[in-house]
């Protein structure tokens, strides 16, 4: 009997089984990992990070901590991971008229903090059907009807609000007026010492600002409002102007004149009168060449001024906290004192806000 030669079939089958088993182990491992992750996420979103303490801080004279928590819609046992902060913040603002801002912070593992600030009435906004009472940040607090003004607050005329519903942020479909309103209100809130009593923006190309001192500022168009207000404030604080009532007028892009009379004075040889609202095109930009004409006029030397009119003071430098202001003083063609200021700085605006550190703990 012949010997039977054995083959390696069994060995080949064993190798295939091992590779197949290894692949299955990898699949099983992946499934286990997925199941563990799923279980972990499920536990986190159901059993862990559930709210058991809510802290309310900030200032609100009108509402209690319980009122604020109820308005947010947040309850004890709600999961921090599933909480939509923005939605809850907006709910507070919508439901509580006299809350200006609401910020919700998650305090892991089980805490939550709600910080609110109270609305501060700041402006009367006059419109066709009445007067809106508006907060510092533009929230409509009340529609007071025709002729009902809150005394002591600045009055804005000609804004044309798009809606008058209390609780909403005031808006305007006219983009130019909307831009001017934002900068005006921000500047007034940031510096109440400006003592602005009313603003007429019926014509966005010729905005007029009235001050408690009795002075009137012809600002011109809607652009660079905060910069213009700062420039006018600097003029009124100058020792030669302070305490006087008069008319301020933007001349070009970076100059402001002050006169004690409203009568126009023509610049010889130009056909242009000062003061008065700077001529503008419908685009809101100054007429080409106007700035150069005014610059030449306001920067005259003593010798040049005397040849045209009684003008006996030379250029003087002024430093009132800003740089590059120049003015020329004297009697301008018999119409009253005039002071022209120029400012070449860049204006970056103001940052302002209110921080409150009072708090109440609320455990639901």
Image (cartoon, grey):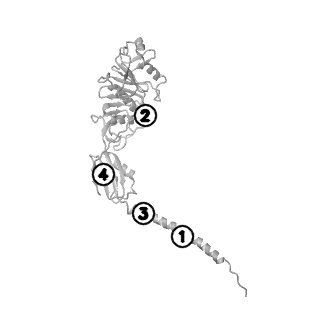
**Foreground: disc 2 or disc 3:** 3
Q: As drawn, is 364 to the left or to the right of 180?
A: left
Q: Secondary structure at mark 4?
A: strand
Label 4 belongs to which residue? 56
Real-space Cα separation, disc 4 to disc 1, in angstroms: 53 Å
Badge 3 or badge 1: first in the primary sequence: 1
Toward the viewer: 148 or 171? 171
**Label 3 environment density (alpha carbons within 10 Å; few <14, some 14–19, many ≥20):** few
Q: Residue at x 46, y 63 (%)?
A: 37
Lower sequence index among marks 4 and 2: 4
Q: Which mark is residue 42?
A: 3
Residue 329 vs 131, above or below: the answer is above
Label 4 and label 3: CA atoms lie apart by 29 Å
Q: Residues within 10 Å of mark 1 (few under 14, many from 20)?
A: few
Q: Of the residues tagged 3 and 1, which is closer to the observer?
A: 1
The residue tagged 1 is 25
Work out which residue is located at the far top of the displayed protein and give it. Answer: 307
Quadrant in which residue 45 is drawn: bottom left
Q: Which mark is residue 176?
A: 2
Q: Is residue 5 above or below residue 203?
A: below
């Amino acid at each position: 009997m012949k010997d039977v030669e054995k083959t390696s079939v069994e060995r080949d089958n064993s190798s295939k089984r091992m590779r197949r088993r290894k692949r299955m182990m990898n699949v099983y491992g992946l499934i286990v990992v997925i199941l563990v992750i799923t279980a972990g996420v499920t536990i986190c979103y159901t059993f862990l990070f559930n709210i058991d303490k809510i802290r309310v801080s900030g200032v609100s004279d009108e509402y209690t901590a319980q009122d604020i928590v109820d308005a947010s819609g947040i309850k004890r046992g709600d999961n921090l991971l599933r909480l939509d902060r923005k939605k809850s913040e907006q709910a507070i603002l919508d439901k509580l008229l006299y809350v200006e801002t609401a910020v919700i912070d998650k305090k892991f593992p089980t805490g939550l903090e709600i910080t609110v600030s109270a609305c501060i009435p700041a402006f009367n906004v006059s419109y066709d059907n009445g007067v809106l009472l508006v907060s510092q940040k533009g929230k409509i607090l009340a529609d007071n009807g025709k002729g009902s003004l809150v005394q002591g607050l600045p009055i804005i005329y000609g804004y044309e609000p798009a809606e008058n519903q209390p609780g909403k942020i005031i808006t305007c479909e006219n983009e130019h007026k909307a831009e001017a309103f934002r900068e005006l209100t921000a500047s007034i809130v940031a510096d109440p010492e400006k003592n602005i009593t009313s603003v007429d923006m019926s014509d966005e190309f010729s905005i007029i600002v009235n001050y408690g001192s009795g002075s009137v500022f012809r600002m011109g168009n809607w652009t660079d409002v905060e910069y213009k207000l700062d420039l006018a404030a600097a003029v009124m604080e100058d020792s030669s102007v302070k305490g006087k009532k008069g008319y301020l007028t933007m001349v070009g892009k970076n100059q402001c004149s002050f006169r004690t009379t409203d009568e126009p004075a023509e610049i010889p040889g130009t056909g242009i009168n000062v003061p008065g609202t700077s001529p503008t095109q419908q685009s809101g930009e100054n007429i080409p060449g106007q700035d150069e004409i005014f610059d030449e006029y306001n920067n005259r030397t003593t010798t040049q001024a005397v040849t045209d009119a009684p003008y006996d003071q030379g250029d003087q430098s002024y430093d009132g906290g800003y740089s590059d202001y120049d003015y020329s003083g004297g009697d301008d063609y018999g119409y009253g004192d005039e002071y022209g200021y120029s400012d070449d700085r860049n204006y970056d605006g103001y940052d302002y806000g209110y921080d409150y550190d009072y708090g109440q703990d609320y455990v639901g």
